[in-house]
Image: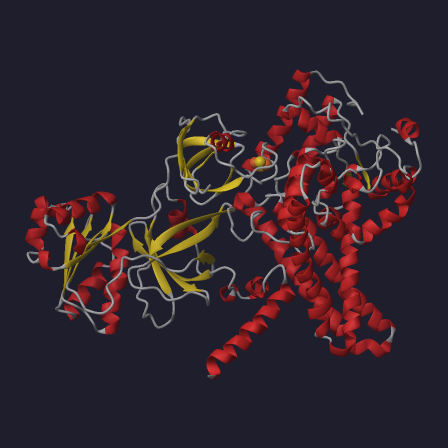
Amino acid sequence: MAVPQSRSVWSRILDVASLAATPLAPSHYLELVSPLRATHTLNARVEAVHDEGDGTRTLTLRPGRGFRSHRAGQYVRVGAAINGRVVTRTFSISSSPDRRDGCIAITVKATPDGKLSRFLVHDVRPGAYLTIAQAQGSFVQPEGAPVRPLFVTAGSGITPVMSMIRTFVARGTMPDAVHVHYARTGETALFATELASVAAAHPRYRYVLVTTREGHGARARFDRAALDALVPDWQSREAWACGPQGMLDAVEACFAAAGRAQHLHLEAFHAKLAPRDAKATGGRVRFGLSRADVEANGQTSLLEVAEAAGIQAAHGCRMGICHSCDVTMVSGCVRDLRTGAEVNEPGIRVQICVHAAAGNVDLAL
Amino acid sequence: MTFPIVMNPETRDRFGAEIDAVQRDINASLGDRDRRYIKRMIAIQRGLAVAGRLTIYASLPLLPTGLPFLAVIGLGSFTLGIAKILENMEIGHNIIHGQWDWMNDPSINSSTWEWDNVCPADQWKHSHNVVHHTWTNVMGRDRDVGYEILRVNPTQPWHPAALGQPVYNALLALLFQWGVAVHDIDIGGMKSGKTTWEQERVKLRGVARKAAKQLTKDYVLWPLLAGPFFLYVIGANAFANMMRNVWSYMIIFCGHFPDGVHHFTEADVAEETRSGWQLRQTLGSCNIEGGALFHVLSGNLSHQIEHHLFPDMPSNRYPEAARRVRAICARYGVPYNSGSLTRQFGTTLRTIFRLALPGGGGERLARA
Ligand code: FES
């Protein structure tokens, strides 16, 4: 067969080209002239920004060549350098994978302590490049047999569901669906206009907007009674819920009580940051790869903590100069014993010989 | 081999605290400007590498013209040489030190960076970042003192083999990357039983694997592109590699071997505190003076003292750190060894030649 053969010739050519660029890859050079063609890393260009009001903005991104399309409902990891430091967070994709131009959209709400969300909403301009990763997540519609979905969303938790609804519209496969969305006011409800017109054009899609600040009274918060009233047949539907943790807990409890837990799909907002507490000293340290979980104080370096727990941790100078001891911090907060500065960025590499726990820490060691 | 200044522990701790403050201030001010610096440096370096290689091919049609051909191929290999120098020094050496890890950028990180050099980055991290930077100038511990083949300090016992020093030195300069590549192989340690042949063989295999790729690139693949003229490309690439070798050898030898630098015994560092370590780094390192371009080409190792005090501080900040460190040293009366390239390299060469012969201690002391 011609196709696989030509590919193997091509991949052999690529191998040789890589050797000519060793220790880098040709992609490192290509990236300088055409960031979207890089293969050693995945970039995306901001094509357009659209303010949705209420500190929320939709960014249209053109992903680099290597990006595989997403499934409606999935999220993508986005990174940008802020004050020189790369910060990455995950955002649900709000656009349909069927978009003709190959772009994806994320809709971001600036949160007060959200470094990246504030940057994306206030500072980023069209033409800027961000790093992304492949889309991930299992908050998706089942392939194959259509279901009768119930969507329960709140605030910017509507984004993954938006991608699903846009996909139904684009493919002409709108199922019998009910969508209950909670927003503070009618004006701040994300995508309200678009969804109203979708509802007008697709009688099978019912859009229920509940405003929590405008006197919906007893039905303003999610609970069993409100759900019974709004969607009487909810027990015969497959449900997808996305929003703040409080709402998700309520939805989960309601479905569990009705014995329908297996018909509920949940998506929480991602990346809860560990609190950065100037007074916190010590905490529980989890060494995930070594299956150890120990208590540590705020003065003992994590290297010593690991060694006391019987873990052989790689190290060199033990004084913060050689970086042999760097370990990825999965989550948590540590303090630099030299400067007293706290670090709580998930995924950052920590020199464990000069950092101590400042709260609970989860290390990839 | 005692400390050239007498400092009581309290004064020394105050000295150390002032040095720490320099690091704290600069680290706290790192930001976008610094990120732009390293990103631009990387882009310039990659651009120069491509330009150099293309210029080498562009010279081939000029072959019959003689002199113009030589000029163009010379320009090409010189450009490639500069690219390799930037790649190894201002970019590679410094990234591998973790100077840019604060950016949390997976593509510019000490844990994953590999450089254009036959020495694998992980072995370099051990021999250089760990051994040399921790044990700087401690006789018997710092294997960078004379690289175990040169006698650079009169307290090292003389052996007839030292007579060949001027020759070894020249060879080391030309083949510096190979010297660096096998430097982590601990022959002394094998004799004393600290390590075994099995352990060292793993490292050698790593060097061989890396070297095979490097050699294939510069001496097979790129030359093949020139078809029948491959020999010229081999020559040009060899020139670029050698140029990088000699330059990095020179800069690195100026870091710890010029006159006035201090060496220490294991006893000196037995109970060393952090400020003692800082003082030793200052006394054991030498700076080279020059313009901005010179500093960049030296990978800012011309600020060797600051590099040893702050090994993971981004190199573009060393000039600023140097002004403050120099002022602190002046106030505490700590010798700050800084001189022109001619002075630093000249005295280094003189030492290597003089110590090829027995003795050398008295004269050296008289000079110091
Ligand atoms: S062991 Fe050297 S930096 Fe931690």
Query: For the point 58% across and 69% down, which residue is it?
Result: A15
Query: For the point 77% across and 53% down, which residue is it?
Result: B245
Q: Tell me the quadrant of ligand 1.
A: top right
Give how far across and how far down residue A216 sits, in percent. 10, 47
Give how far across and how far down residue B331 sits, in percent. 72, 23
Give how far across and how far down residue B308 sits, in percent. 68, 36
Residue A360 shows in the view: no
Q: In this view, does A148 lie above or below B21?
A: below
Q: Tell whether A269 sits left or right of B72.
A: left
Residue B245 shows in the view: yes
Q: Tell whether A96 sits left or right of B290.
A: left
Which of A82 and B80 lies nearest the eye of the viewer?
Answer: B80
Q: Is residue B334 above or below residue B202?
A: above
Query: For the point 77% across and 36% down, which residue is it?
Result: B286
Query: What is the tally of numbered marks visible in this picture?
Result: 0
Q: How is the image coloured?
A: secondary structure
* Figure quadrant of residue A31: bottom right
